[in-house]
């Protein structure tokens, strides 16, 4: 089963970011603003975010607060 790393933005904790497991955040200029929260399976990722992951290799998600 495919897995993804999930990060939280430390400056805006209502913003999450999914990337392929182990990919890290090499393309983000503000990578230090993101904290790894854990790894999730594809079944735990919302459908919209999963579509973004498949298309772009990453997906942002607004989190409920």
Image: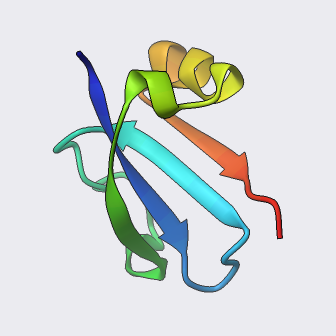
Left or right: 2 as drawn, with respect to 41: left
Q: Residue at x 52, y 14 (%)?
A: 55
Q: Residue furthest left?
A: 22
Find residue 30 and report its horizontal and vertical position in percent. Answer: 47, 73
Find residue 37 and report its horizontal and vertical position in percent. Answer: 38, 66
Q: Residue at x 59, y 57 (%)?
A: 16
**Residue 15 drawn above or below residue 54:** below
Please tell me which residue lies in front, 1 or 57.
Answer: 1
**Quarter that holds the N terminus:** top left
Q: Residue furthest right?
A: 65
Image quarter of residue 10: bottom right
Find residue 54 and report its horizontal and vertical position in percent. Answer: 47, 14
**Residue 63 drawn above or below residue 19:** below
- Count of numbered tags: 0
Image quarter of residue 13: bottom right
**Quarter that holds the C terminus:** bottom right
**Residue 38 drawn above or below residue 30:** above
Image quarter of residue 14: bottom right
Left or right: 61 as drawn, with respect to 20: right
Please tell me which residue lies in front, 26 or 64.
Answer: 64
């Amino acid at each position: 089963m495919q897995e993804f790393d999930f990060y939280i933005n430390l400056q805006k904790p209502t913003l999450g970011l999914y990337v392929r497991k182990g990919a890290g955040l090499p393309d983000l200029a503000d990578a230090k603003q993101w904290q790894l929260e854990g790894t999730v399976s594809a079944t735990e990722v919302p459908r919209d975010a999963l579509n973004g992951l498949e298309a772009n290799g990453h997906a942002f998600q607004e989190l409920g607060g």
